[in-house]
Amino acid sequence: MTLIVTGSIGIDTISTPSGERREGVMGGSCAYFAAAASFHCPVRIVAVAGDDLPPSFLKTFTHFGIDTRGLEIRKGEKTFRWGGKYLGNMDQRETLFTELNVLGGKPAAIPAAYQDSKYVFLANAPPAVQRAMLDNFPGRTLAVADTMNLWIETAKDDLLALLKEVDGLVLNYDEAEQLTGKTNAVAAAKHILEFGPRFVVVKKGEHGCILVHRDGIAALPAYPAENVVDPTGAGDTFAGGMMGYLAGNKLEDPAAFPDVLKALAHGTVMASFTIEAFSLERLEELTKEELAARFAEFAAMLRLA
């Protein structure tokens, strides 16, 4: 089944203890998500960029087989740019600059050919925009959203309205606490379920994730990575691996607890590759055989008997 993602395409400048990329590399939630999901299923993107978007970025989308008919290139405008510096053991990040540029305008239009998409992921954006996007897919099978602290602070009512219409929500621990006022991740996620979704995924970075579903609760550790070069985009590739698995398999109910849990394991493994290099460099070299081997290794790690 075809998966569609709406989100950002960006040009990133990144510095970590392992090195730096100052010339500008591909970034943005849409880019990371789509690349990860493409290992499991066909992916469509809806995003906007300026005419300064490097031609190499389009070649990268082609490499992953991503459908870019929903990528609008606006003449005379500049692409979203972000710069960040990771400190110490990379658990702290300093934002050096953020230039919204084309993201400050109207969102990209959704091509008519995309409106039959069954699996929808709403990457980080104002919740009112996410909700408007969702209205374009009345026949959807599964819809999951991401959010961030800014929208919880400035557009909480819009976010709560969105949560009534999606099947799942993905967010960080701090965001779950901010949204609910509860400091316990499980308690916070249970409270979010009352707003409407069937499941909530709370990301905890190097400590893995927690799934709180109407039918159960589970926790997964992160894959024990030895070589962390650049954590940028790990959360987006996590979501891409998760949604790609759900869309790429013929599941009777893709929001069912066992399937979502297995999907999170696929997302965890995908993110473990992303952090091994800058931007999408590692995913561009990744083979399906490598991916399957690491997933088997991760699955074996989780068995207690």
Image (cartoon, grey):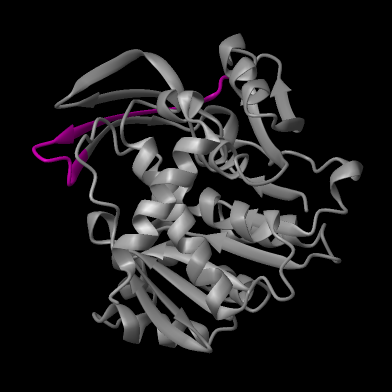
Determine the image quadrant of residue 258. bottom right
Residue 3 percent location from the top left of the image: 71, 50
Give the residue at the far front of this rendering: 305
Magenta residue check for 145: no
Give the residue at the far right of this rendering: 112
Q: Residue at x 34, y 61 (%)?
A: 300
Q: Relative to 298, is 26 above or below?
A: above
Residue 57 visible within the image: yes
Q: Residue at x 80, y 43 (%)?
A: 110
Determine the image quadrant of residue 281. top left
Going by the image, does 50 lie left or right of 23?
Answer: right
Q: Relative to 190, is 162 above or below?
A: above
Q: Relative to 163, is 33 above or below?
A: above
| 94, 143: nearer the viewer | 143
Q: Residue at x 23, y 50 (%)?
A: 224
Q: Relative to 201, is 218 above or below?
A: below
- The magenta stretch is 77-93
Going by the image, does 103 lie left or right of 210?
Answer: right
Magenta residue check for 82: yes
Residue 124 visible within the image: no
| 92, 239: nearer the viewer | 239
Residue 262 percent location from the top left of the image: 50, 66
Determine the image quadrant of residue 290. top left
Going by the image, does 110 lie left or right of 164?
Answer: right
| 283, 133: nearer the viewer | 283
Residue 29 percent location from the top left of the image: 51, 41
Quarter placement of the C terminus: bottom left
Going by the image, does 260 lie left or right of 273?
Answer: right
Residue 278 percent location from the top left of the image: 34, 25
> What is the number of callouts on the image?
0
